[in-house]
Amino acid sequence: MNEPGDRDLVVAALDGRGEAYAELVRRHEAVAHRVAAVILHSATDAEDVTQDAFVKAYQHLNRFRLDAPFRPWLLRIVGNEARNRRRSGGRRTYYEARVLHDPDRQSEYGQPESEALAAADREGLLTAVNNLPNKERVVVALRFFADLSEAETAATLGIPAGTVKSRLNRAMGRLRSDLERVDV
């Protein structure tokens, strides 16, 4: 039996079936959390924002266009909630911890020398990303750290896809230049 699509789950949730909305949350909570964390720079705040965004999405589910994909609509809400929260104060860097301590990015040999070099490379990359202008940094983080497509990044930030492409292009040029200078 095929799993119901997001549209089917939205229709079921609109009919009052709570388990349908719970399934939508289950499907999209990881990416929603990553998006919030990238914008906020805080995993703890991202948890709160993600919950708030899912509540807000549920409250406004009747405004969702059934002919549109659900994920970009949801991520736009997450992005708006995160930007609102970020305006309220400074936050620590979430993706710093993610990049520096990601078990998937550890050395395949597990040797201390290899791990130290890999950590230095990640640290150099992170420093270069953090030195980007905010608009470019957020686009790079959403696109590559949160693994969003260009279209999803555009929808999340409420900007045209062409703007995402141009910001990515500028950011990648700056990163290349910065990383060549420090020989990372």
Image (spheres, grey):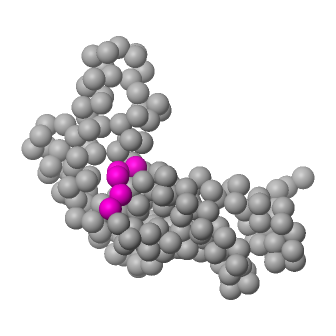
Q: Is residue 165 left or right of residue 73?
A: left
Q: Nearer the viewer, residue 101 or 152?
A: 101
Q: Residue at x 23, y 46 (%)?
A: 127
Q: Decide: is 184 above or below 169.
A: above
Give the image quarter of residue 4.
bottom right
Residue in the image at 42% along x and 54% along y: 42
Q: Is residue 38 above or below residue 56?
A: above
Q: Quadrant of residue 54?
A: bottom right
Q: How many labels were placed on the picture? A: 0
Whether 165 is drawn above or below 111: the answer is: below
Residue extending furthest right? 1
The span picked out in magenta is 90-94
Q: Give the image location of residue 171, x and y in percent.
A: 25, 60
Split into 4 quadrants, where in the image is the C terminus?
A: top left
Q: Is residue 100 magenta?
A: no
Q: Main secondary structure of the magenta part?
A: loop
Name the one closer to the observer, 87 or 115.
Answer: 87
- Residue in the image at 28% along x and 23% along y: 116
Give the image location of residue 17, x and y in percent.
Answer: 87, 69
Q: Residue at x 61, y 62 (%)?
A: 51
Residue 100: x %, y % from top left: 35, 37
Query: Which residue is at the front of the view, 53 or 5?
Result: 53
Residue 111 is left or right of residue 176, and the answer is: right
Residue 122 percent location from the top left of the image: 30, 37
Judge whether residue 91 is colored magenta.
Answer: yes
Residue 15 appears in the figure: yes
